[in-house]
Amino acid sequence: VIPGWFSEISPMWPGEAHSLKVEKVLFEGKSDYQNVMVFQSSTYGKVLVLDGVIQLTERDECAYQEMITHLPLCSIPNPKKILVIGGGDGGVLREIARYSSVEKIDICEIDKMVVEVSKQFFPDVAVGFEDPRVTLNIGDGVAYLKAVEEGTYDAVIVDSSDPIGPAQELFEKPFFASVARALRPGGVVCTQAESIWLHMDIIEGIVANCRQIFKGSVNYAWTTVPTYPSGMIGFMLCSTEGPTVDFKNPVYSIDEDDSQTRPLKFYNSELHSAAFCLPSFAKRAICSK
Ligand code: AAT
């Protein structure tokens, strides 16, 4: 460990640790679920860390939040009811709020401290909570989904941390089954699905589960995020049986909507389609089974 630097050390990426220079630690606390830390970095703005793992930085959060949101929502016409699991920083809410078709945004985040800390230190991210269509629930996403009435949502976005800690069950088959139940026919889910460089075993497990549960389509997409392990992160995009969803060819271009008061920083329609192109080794592992 280099003094004055933050190193992201975890058994989930043994033998490597991305480091950022720390200007100042702004917050350190322990919630009921995890350690929460915020620091000012030299080159990536403020950084939110949970249990030693980077959740977002001000400089590159746009890549993750815009892709995890617009990949599913631009793949279906006129999304109306959306559920977010995790995402307590509010960034995914900020992105969903761009859609005038959306009527209701429910969010279930397990850790109240993440919401409070985000409102205090990341106002440009937590701005998502200000949208009047948002209802915040503090609780476990697994329990929340079990209680949802069948066929409620057009889209579910699972903005979850890694499968060590409170998010473990969000990577398991019963959870995907309750997501499918909560979706309308032809509804879509997008879940945080780790890195093809580091977690092919986890990804193959998720793909196998999703193939059994989602009878529409099952796809993996990815994007660069410099401060996530290996510099990239992937998403599973699946649809339930019903109207066909062709994820690779978006039906709506949010990036061409002139009414946006905050222009998109990262997502556009070309990147949307490109996100589904995989390196050969990943294609073999993910697409051939
Ligand atoms: N948008 C920032 C990126 C995240 S945040 C993941 C959120 O999921 C955290 O706020 C965490 O408290 C919440 N969470 C974890 N488990 C649950 C659960 N069971 N129910 C509801 N919310 C939960 C993801 C960063 C990815 C990091 C990649 N290395």
Image: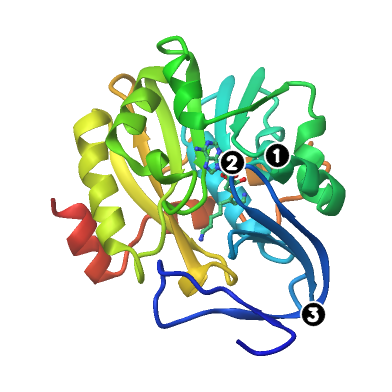
Q: Residue at x 24, y 70 (%)?
A: 280
Q: Decide which of 161, 200 is in the foreground and name it.
A: 161
Find residue 157 and name its label: none
Name the residue beneath numbered marker 3.
42
Label 3 crowd (10 A; few <14 / some 14-19 / many >=20)? few
Above or below, comparing residue 216 to residue 250 in the picture: above
Name the residue beneath numbered marker 2.
253
Q: Amino acid at mark 1?
A: Asp
* Marks 1/3: CA–CA distance: 34 Å
Label 2 crowd (10 A; few <14 / some 14-19 / many >=20)? some
Q: Residue at x 45, y 82 (%)?
A: 16
Q: Are marks 2 and 1 in contact (CB under 8 Å)?
A: yes
Name the residue beneath numbered marker 1.
257
The N terminus: image quadrant: bottom right
* Marks 2/1: CA–CA distance: 7 Å
Q: Is residue 93 left or right of residue 229?
A: right
Q: Is residue 39 left or right of residue 287?
A: right
Of badges 1 and 3, the one in the foreground is 3
Return the residue found at the far bottom: 2
Q: Amino acid at mark 2?
A: Ser
